[in-house]
Image (spheres, rainbow, N blue to C red):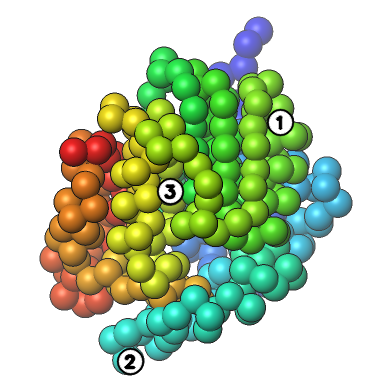
Amino acid sequence: MTKAPQEKAAALASNIRALADAILEQNPMHRSFLTAALANITPDELSHLERYLDFCRQRGLTIDYLAECYLTIVGDTLREQIYFQKHKKYRYSSFAEVADNVYFNDEYMSFYMYGLAITSFLWPNHLALFRFFRDMLPRDKKGAYLEIGPGHGYFLLTAMERSAYTSFKGVDISETSIAQTRALLEHFGGGKKSFELTCMDFLACDLPENGFDAIVMGEVLEHVEEPERFLRQIARLAKKDAHIFVTTCINAPAVDHIYLFRTPEQIEKLFADCGLKIKSQLIRPYEGKTLEESLQQLLAINVAYVLERK
């Protein structure tokens, strides 16, 4: 007899249970948040988290290490939130201030990427962005797909498995991110589709104008000094009918966030100024707060947009 989805998820969830236990052993105060987070995950998402953890373990990573990666993100974010609430600005404002300690620090970047991948499932705001990405992804369009800053690689893997695009390219400034993404895609096969990963500055890439049928850039704009240059580059590289997906955040401090967006309108004006128009959007206020409350109290807001060229 075929098991129900819930039974299948339960059968797969040994790594998740072990991770939850390890997180709570290291940080018992996280229990209520973690309980609510796990209740928010669908059986299908649970199975995807389980397989990601299994991939990590096959790479020789322990559950305790993965719990430490996740809690590093939790602790660093909390510290930056306290700083932001006190000073009303991010701690750093230039790439040079964070590059060596984050992107070019292999040990920390590994922690960061594994932890961030786990937050894609456990943090309700990050899970909402992932769901929006997955649901908005065209299923029958073919052609070339470009992702800027694939990070841990899970969005790129999802695109390879769920879409009909035929070639995939990822560009990231971090060697550590490129290595993690490559390992993930090679492990799961990515639907047996071809892919190319390049470690370099997106603004310095020699990519074809009007050359891409899909361009994805998740959580990059807040990490750069001149986000408009990235958006203009996207508009230049995208075909007229390309699927463009961009996420960023408002009043959301992190160790490497340097560009502070304060309102959705600020971001949306930037799109218009860079030759892009909005087709669909997700604005996710701070958990348990309205958008207005989040803006007034300087609480983190996550946003995602499906765009097209004007």
Of the numbered discs in the image, which one, if any, rests on residue 94? none
SS type, badge 1: helix
From the viewer's perspective, is the residue at label 3 or at label 1 nearer? 3
Q: Which residue is mark 1?
A: 188
The C terminus, quarter of image: top left
Q: Is residue 189 above or below residue 15?
A: above
Residue 51 visible from this viewpoint: no
On screen, residue 152 versus residue 180, left or right, reads left
> How many residues crowd around disc 1 within 10 Å: few (fewer than 14), some, or many (20 or more)?
some
Q: Which residue is mark 2?
A: 86
SS type, badge 2: helix
- Which amino acid type is marked by label 2? Lys
On screen, residue 7 versus residue 293, left or right, reads right
| Residue in the foreground of this view, choosing between 39 and 284 | 284
Residue projecting furthest to the top: 1
Instruction: Check contact, mark 2 vs mark 3: CB within 8 A.
Output: no
- Which amino acid type is marked by label 3? Met
Q: Position of residue 172 (x, y in %)?
A: 58, 54
Q: Is residue 82 above or below residue 164?
A: below
SS type, badge 3: strand
Residue projecting furthest to the right: 60
Q: Earlier in the sequence, mark 2 or mark 3?
A: 2
> How many residues crowd around disc 2 within 10 Å: few (fewer than 14), some, or many (20 or more)?
few
Q: Residue at x 71, y 27 (%)?
A: 189
Q: Earlier in the sequence, mark 2 or mark 1?
A: 2
The N terminus, quarter of image: top right
Q: Quote the CA–CA distance across marks 3 and 1.
A: 22 Å
**Which picture quadrant has residue 101?**
bottom right
| Residue in the foreground of this view, choosing between 214 and 210 | 210
Q: Position of residue 284 (x, y in %)?
A: 28, 54
Q: Which residue is mark 3?
A: 217
